[in-house]
């Protein structure tokens, strides 16, 4: 595959923004699944961990599970690396060392190291940045490393790491062009982060048979939700029960939403499975779950009208968002800032949320995968979304313009939900950040 690299090659002193532009230019395809190229470069970089490694895959819930694991391990006093993707606003969000985002200088140094050894091997943006962040972690003296799978599992760059423990949070339809169009095919792809003889956590209450068969075939130590571990809760507190460990009388996680106990119990199952190497006392579990933060996952901003940010971008996540909205109580009107990418199941997402929304503000997203606000509005009308005195559908060029319009129309007692893509939430967060800065100036 030919490379179309820029004339001037960046180095460790090059600004991060220039590095990221360079990385977008050096591979012909944004997604190029397969581990041969990335593994070859990883071998040249001699990436190896003394730290305990936990790999987290799944259709939804990966980010929340990773964030809870990080928070609990940090509260227990461990040195922790966390790799997640995509980022919302700044690339640095993808790499956290001991709870702090990696600096521009740290990332540029690692990018230069990867570029220096890759030779004529082409790497996608995701592969290149994954290798750089893995190298950063390998040199940071960490006790534990938490790695979120980017796409699928079997052929994802993160899967070059033989995880000490792997978690599959959920299996549902997303990225069907790459992973297959049914849960059995997708489950097969995700199960490949499991390793023989090592803890393999499955948080999906009804896992596809393909995942169970793969785990059995390789001899993974499969921990199934409902069989090997579970949770119970009332209005005040909840408890976790595993194979040989119970954690009782815990406050609910700081992350809101109906599925967070499922994610939290999967994280606790992983910690139980690893407790000989990473013991975590009960106080650290309590503190970590109370302190955990993750922008864009049913994040409710302070003030009125209520503003909810959620990166839900597939039907499964949209169904969870719908349940969470239903549990919020009564609001006269619900306004939605809605933007999606064209390779997602737009109609499936609309079907899960359609009747809960009174006013739609369709936001265009840029880039080759983006969908215009007008196209989204047309999809809503085709799906039967209402228009009239108390309902509307309007289109805007981007999430910032859509949010500004929603904010103008919404009453104090209403709510605004921003969803459909990481890019939609990021656009609104950036707009709010810039607005705050302008008011201070």
Image (spheres, rainbow, N blue to C red):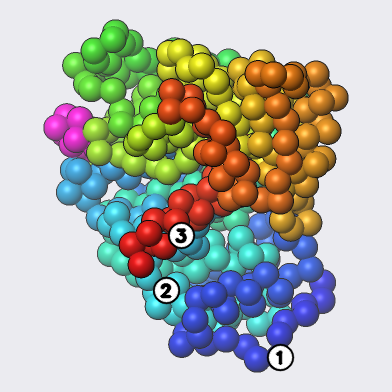
Q: What's the distance in space between the residues labelled 1 and 2, CA to CA? A: 22 Å
Q: Earlier in the sequence, mark 1 or mark 2?
A: 1
Q: Earlier in the sequence, mark 2 or mark 3?
A: 2
Residue 23 shown left or right of residue 70 in the figure: right
- Where does label 2 land, which residue? 104
User: For residue 362, which quarter of the picture?
Assistant: top right
Residue 145 visible within the image: yes
Numbered disc 2: secondary structure: helix
Q: Is residue 78 above or below residue 27?
A: above
In this view, the mark in front (2 or 3): 3
Neighbour tally class for label 3: few under 14, some 14-19, many 20 plus, Cα within 10 Å: few
Count the labels in the image. 3
What range is drawn magenta here?
279-288
- Residue 434 is labelled as 3
Q: Is mark 2 in CB contact (under 8 Å) with mark 3?
A: no
Numbered disc 3: secondary structure: helix
Q: Nearer the viewer, residue 296 or 207?
A: 296
Q: Nearer the viewer, residue 66 or 140?
A: 66
Q: Nearer the viewer, residue 350 or 164?
A: 350
Q: What's the distance in space between the residues labelled 2 and 3, CA to CA? A: 21 Å
Measured from the top left, where is residue 115 in percent x and y? 58, 80
- Residue 7 is labelled as 1
């Amino acid at each position: 595959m030919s490379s179309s690299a820029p004339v001037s090659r960046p180095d460790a002193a090059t600004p991060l923004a220039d590095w990221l532009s360079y990385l977008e230019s050096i591979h012909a395809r944004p997604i190029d699944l397969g581990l041969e190229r990335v593994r070859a470069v990883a071998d040249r970089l001699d990436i190896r961990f003394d730290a305990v490694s936990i790999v987290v895959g799944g259709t939804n819930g990966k980010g929340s599970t990773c964030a809870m694991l990080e928070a609990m391990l940090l509260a227990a006093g461990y040195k922790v690396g966390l790799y997640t993707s995509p980022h919302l606003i700044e690339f640095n969000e993808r790499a956290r060392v001991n709870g702090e985002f990696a600096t521009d200088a740290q990332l540029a140094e690692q990018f230069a190291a990867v570029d220096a050894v890759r030779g004529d091997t082409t790497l996608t943006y995701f592969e290149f940045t994954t290798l750089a962040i893995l190298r950063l972690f390998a040199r940071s003296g960490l006790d534990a490393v938490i790695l979120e799978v980017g796409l699928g599992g079997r052929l994802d760059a993160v899967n070059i790491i033989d995880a000490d423990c792997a978690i599959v949070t959920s299996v549902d339809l997303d990225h069907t062009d790459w992973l297959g169009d049914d849960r059995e095919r997708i489950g097969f792809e995700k199960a490949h982060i499991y390793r023989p003889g090592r803890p393999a956590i499955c948080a999906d209450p009804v896992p596809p048979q393909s995942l169970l068969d793969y785990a059995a075939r390789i001899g993974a130590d499969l921990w199934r939700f409902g069989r090997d571990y579970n949770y119970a809760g009332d209005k005040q507190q909840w408890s976790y029960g595993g194979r040989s460990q119970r954690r009782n009388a815990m406050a609910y996680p700081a992350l809101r939403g109906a599925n967070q106990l499922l994610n939290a119990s999967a994280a606790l199952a992983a910690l139980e499975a690893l407790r000989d190497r990473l013991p975590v006392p009960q106080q650290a579990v309590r503190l970590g779950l109370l302190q955990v933060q993750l922008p864009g996952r049913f994040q409710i901003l302070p003030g009125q009208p209520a503003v909810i940010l959620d990166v839900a971008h597939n039907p499964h996540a949209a169904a969870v968002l719908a349940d969470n909205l239903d549990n919020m109580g009564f609001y006269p009107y619900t306004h939605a800032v809605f933007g999606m990418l064209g390779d997602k199941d737009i109609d499936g997402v609309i079907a899960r949320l359609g009747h809960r929304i009174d006013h739609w503000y369709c936001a265009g997203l840029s880039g080759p995968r983006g969908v215009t606000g007008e196209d989204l509005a047309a999809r809503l009308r085709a799906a039967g979304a209402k228009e009239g005195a108390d309902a509307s559908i309007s289109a805007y060029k981007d999430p910032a313009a859509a949010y500004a319009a929603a904010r103008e129309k919404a009453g104090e007692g209403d709510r605004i939900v921003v969803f459909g893509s990481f890019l939609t939430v990021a656009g609104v967060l950036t707009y709010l950040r810039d607005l705050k800065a302008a008011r201070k100036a």
